Image (cartoon, rainbow, N blue to C red):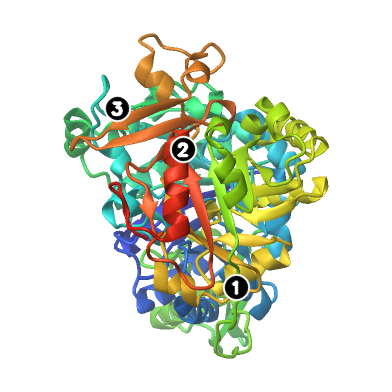
Amino acid sequence: MKPELLAPAGSPAALRAAIMAGADAVYFGAQSFNARKNADNFSDEELKTAIETCRLYGVKTNIVLNTQLYSAELDEAIRLAERLLSYGADAFIVADLGLARELARRFPGISLHASTQCSGQNALSAEALAEIGFERMVAPRELPLRDIRMLCERSPIETEIFIHGALCVSHSGQCLMSSIIGGRSGNRGECAQPCRLPYKTKNPYPLSLKDLCLAAHVPDLIDAGVASFKIEGRMKTPEYVYGVISVYRKLIDEHRAATPQEIAHMASLFCRSGFTDGYHTEEINKTMLGVRTEGDKQVTASLSSDKMAERKIDLRLEASFFVGEPARLRGVVVRDGRTITHEIKGEICERAEKTPTSMERIAQNLAKLGGTPFRAIDLDVACDEVNVPISAINAMRRELVDTMCKRLVGKIKEYPKTERFTPSRGSVFSQEKSAYFRFFEAVTPRALTYFDRIFLPLTEYIAHLDGVQGNDKIGIALPPVAFDHELDLVRELAKRAVDAGCREALVSGLWQARLADALGLNKHGDLRLNAYNSESLAVYASLGFSSVILSPEIGPSASVGVASGIPKGYVAYGRLPLMTMEKCVIRDMMMPKLMSAQSCRYCETHPVSSITDRKGTVFPITREFQHRNVIWNSVPTYMADKPLSGLFTHAIFTDEKAHEVDAVIEALEKKLPAAMKFRRL
């Protein structure tokens, strides 16, 4: 079965380009609640027109509501979805789990797609998302072919993958860098792209990746069972959209890989030093790096603007003009196995007294569909020697076209108006104290006394079983990323931790929650869950979480005001994780030769490194599970002297020495002013 070809539309012009190029579906957003805030996007009237146009051509509309929402925004987002459903929208791409659950509750049968911002990474993620109400998961761009195959095979819902376009160096939904250092949240559609900026390394752009292109792998991906091929590009021009979609349309229809010429053509439309398929092929190294060079820009600027071909709907016409009978014109369109027909009846035909209207003349006028969405096929005209005014033939044709357009747009499913959304009230207060330690050596006796819960990375816990065994305060922080082929290893390590007495788990994704449940671990939500509002917290409560750390992006006052049926916490101290990367920057910066993850052992013996930006700011980097990296903020968040009422405190220790850990604990205990450079929530 062919996968859907899903095109970006950042503007009405780009949407038309996508339709003309042969897209099966398009995704676009309103002026609010979408992750491309700087795209042109669509006004309310443009949304209505766009959806109607897509329905006419049989193109599905996926509306992006893929930002995290504050509690006060949920009602507006629900009203927007309600309005778009009344226009005939087919599906919604949603990132906020609270919004998703509320939409599923209010609008039974609504089609929800889990954005990459949901951090769905494997079949366990898909299972959890299905229970919330999603019917499709947008998989990570980092997923290799073997995991795409496993995901398609095991997932209870559809799998959508990005097949072409820009790559973020951080896993989607796990990037705070733009927000924390620049005040522009990627989770809110305002990313300032700090990964595209220069840094003080041998390669000045160690975080900037080439654009993704999987055109050479189309047959494998079709055979894997992917439901939808997604093209990134809501900030791109209509010419880019038309050109790229046209190529992938041919590749899918012909079940073949792209030629070098086709790939070169797409690169001329837009690329960053060429393309990469490194994640797909698991060749994850510094050859993936690239920027938009002056040469790239000049090639694109030199392109002539090719005229976009018109996409036409095949309309079979059958006409009869017999003496004594009404003139008849019947139109037939076959779409997705359905036959849509309509017949127009005209005046009673009279025998021609002199020269009859010829069959050729009738057919010629019926086929004049140039200014319409249709083209005539299999035109069948039968007639006696009758005299039919050309104006009458034209009127019948125009009436048929108008009616067939309405029939193709179809009847829009009606949903009952729903009540105004009222945020939940009330909270469970907690004065507990938890902490994440990147390294076991930093866990001091004072830390063991002060904190109620301490979490170590799973691999760090296993590496120090002798020191942690029997201490029920110390739990595991499950890896922030794991693909299907890695889950058996995660289970094995986590089982060893449970056998050693571990009872608590810090969870940063839905797949981890399912794994923790299977092992009988108490689940505590990490800040990477992006818990912004009362309804997302209600989702985690329904999934059996014991507590959740709120997103550091929502601020102190909102944190206090978020209703919750489980204890909620905030980061009182620590460097925030700014990026979680599939790519090992430590290796690429430090090793002069090109090395793969399989051959590199550098970051195992040097698990902490750093990167310095153009202003001289230093950001620590640590190795994560399976050769991944995390970039941490240059300074710790500090709120010890500004406690938040009713919220438990959470501390993050990355590269602190033992005496620094104890100094922080004293400051937290006594609510002292900061003695170091810091940032506030």
The amino acid sitting under disc 2 is Thr
Left or right of 114 in this view: 503: right
Query: In which quadrant is the N terminus drawn?
Result: top right
* Residue to which mark 1 is pinned: 429
Kindly report the distance in space between the C-alpha atoms of the residues bearing marks 3 and 1: 52 Å
**Is residue 233 in view?**
yes
Badge 1 or badge 2: first in the primary sequence: 1
Q: Which mark is residue 273?
A: 3
Badge 2 or badge 3: first in the primary sequence: 3
Q: Secondary structure at mark 2?
A: loop
Residue situated in front as seen by the camera: 493 or 359: 493
The amino acid sitting under disc 1 is Phe
User: Tag 2: Cα neighbours inside 10 Å, few (<14), some, or many (≥20)?
Assistant: many
Badge 3 or badge 1: first in the primary sequence: 3
Kindly report the distance in space between the C-alpha atoms of the residues bearing marks 1 and 2: 28 Å
User: Tag 3: Cα neighbours inside 10 Å, few (<14), some, or many (≥20)?
Assistant: some
